[in-house]
Image (tube, rainbow, N blue to C red):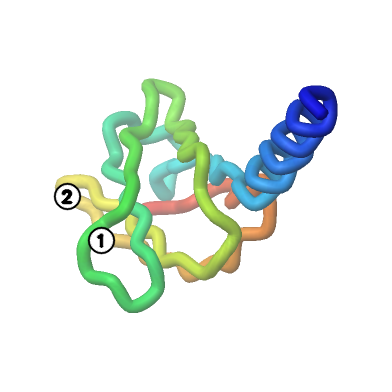
Amino acid sequence: MPKLIVLLTFLFSLAVASQEGSIVGHVIGQDNIPLSFVSVLLFEEGISEPMQGAITEDNGYFRIEGVENKSYTITFNFLGYKTVTIEIKLNGDTNLGNIILE
């Protein structure tokens, strides 16, 4: 019986873990120079408060982990640049590639 409980616990943890992913990307300016300290905010569909966020590193890269698989809006804000908004449907790990701020 204890082996069965351990097995069920393990299988449940795998099922829960497989329902989450991460979002990564690279924020650059129009001149292809990486932008550091850009605010990256993740919003659930239909909710006005951000559920998670990140700040880009010196090389312009960011990562948001532990995100459920569903639809989101992501905003990229940086002083002196126009805000960029992206709609995504997360299904596992997602790489947004280069996000260009103007």
What is the number of the mark on residue 40? none
Q: Residue flagged by tag 2: what amino acid is it?
A: Gly
Q: Residue at x 54, y 54 (%)?
A: 68
Can you see residue 93?
yes
Can you see residue 102?
no
Q: Quadrant of the N terminus?
A: top right
CB within 8 Å, label 2 to label 1: no
> Would residue 33 be found to the left or right of residue 5 on screen?
left
Residue 71 horizontal/vertical position (percent): 52, 69
What is the number of the mark on residue 80? 2
- Quadrant position of residue 34: top left
> Which residue in the rendered view is the most extreme toward the bottom?
46
| Crowd rating for badge 2 (residues with CA inside 10 Å; few <14, some 14–19, many 20+) | few
> Which residue in the rendered view is the most extreme toward the front?
1
Q: Residue at x 45, y 24 (%)?
A: 59
> Would residue 75 be found to the left or right of residue 70 on screen?
left
Residue 52 horizontal/vertical position (percent): 33, 47
44 or 18: nearer the viewer:
18
The kind of secondary structure element at disc 1 is loop
Q: Residue flagged by tag 1: what amino acid is it?
A: Lys
Q: Quadrant of the C terminus?
A: bottom left
Q: Residue at x 37, y 33 (%)?
A: 56
- Quadrant position of residue 17: top right
The kind of secondary structure element at disc 2 is loop
Q: Residue at x 27, y 56 (%)?
A: 50
Disc 2 to disc 1, C-alpha distance:
7 Å
| Crowd rating for badge 1 (residues with CA inside 10 Å; few <14, some 14–19, many 20+) | few
- 26 to 100, vertically: above or below: above
> Would residue 85 be found to the left or right of residue 91 on screen?
left
What is the number of the mark on residue 82? 1
